[in-house]
Image: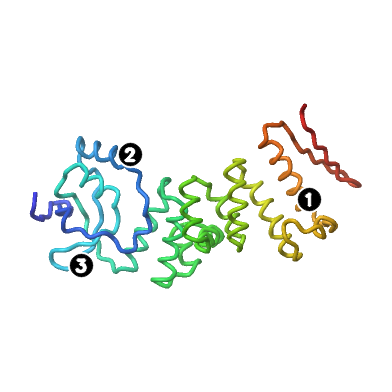
Amino acid sequence: MNRDYYSSNEIIYLSVNKILPNPYQPRKYYSSADLEELASSIKRYGVLQPICVRILNKNIYELVIGERRLKASRIAGFDAVPAIIVDVEGREAAMLNMVENMQREDFNYMEEAEGIKIMRDCFGYSYSDISHITGKSVEYIEKAARLLTLSNEMKNLMVDMKITKDNAIAVSQLEDEKIQEKVLKKVINLDLSSKRTEEIVDYEMHKLAVGENETGNSFKRRKMKDLRYLTAALNDAVATVNSTGLDAKCEISENNENTEINIQIKK
């Protein structure tokens, strides 16, 4: 099928060769296995949900929504796909693309952060605007955008190692890349929860705030008034002990007068 035609229900069939990718598409990663699975389904049942495009000129269209379906259709050998033409400008097209992707479970958080950057830098949306458009809280958007402060190497490593979004956001609070790498290494090697990662990040930030490096004896002697930092340090030590194969645990309990800390290491 090499020609374009309108059906009675306003769906147009377009040659896949006439559809250009969306230049503001934040999504960069697609699972080959998932695309092959979708392509097999398309071969059997066809494209059940039309893609959305906008007109660039008489014979060329730009994808707005449905890149995954378009890729899978090409893999399936289809030379045309059902599409709905939407009358939107670049700004609205980027918005629609972003909203669709953010609703997908397989849209990774780095791509989400890139999408927020596009909406903010290229189209002037504020975090409040993006929150309203996507249905996510302003706090959610701000935390996601924080990931953009990471280096490309760090972002790629987090995606490749399947670091959770909460852990990635916690690490992104650290400005020094060497400290980021050190904490991320612990996250990977010890399979840390987001809560533990946040405690370690707090600990590292506190050390920087008082002007001491990691091995500074004066920091070790300093009285830590905030129990969170002491707790983080102890839990960090216990995690290191456990990484050697020993079985250690740290239990902390409080009453009106005292805080009791109990560390046990099984023989």
Residue 77 as seen in the image, left or right of residue 126: left
In x, y percent, where is residue 80? 15, 50
In x, y percent, where is residue 95? 37, 63
The amino acid type found where label 2 is placed reads: Ala
The amino acid type found where label 3 is placed reads: Leu
Residue 63 as seen in the image, left or right of residue 259: left
Q: Residues within 10 Å of mark 3 (few under 14, many from 20)?
A: few
Residue 48 as seen in the image, left or right of residue 204: left
Q: Residue furthest right?
A: 257
Q: Please tell me which residue is depicted at 59% across the width and 41% down the height of the picture.
A: 191
Secondary element under disc 2, as helix, strand or loop, is helix
Residue 43 as seen in the image, left or right of residue 28: left
The one of 194 and 91 positioned closer to us in this rendering: 194
Identify the residue position indicated by label 3 in the image.
Answer: 56
Q: Earlier in the sequence, mark 3 or mark 2?
A: 2
The chosen color scheme is: rainbow
Secondary element under disc 3, as helix, strand or loop, is loop
Identify the residue position indicated by label 2 in the image.
Answer: 33
Secondary element under disc 1, as helix, strand or loop, is helix
Identify the residue position indicated by label 1 in the image.
Answer: 230
In x, y percent, where is residue 204? 69, 57
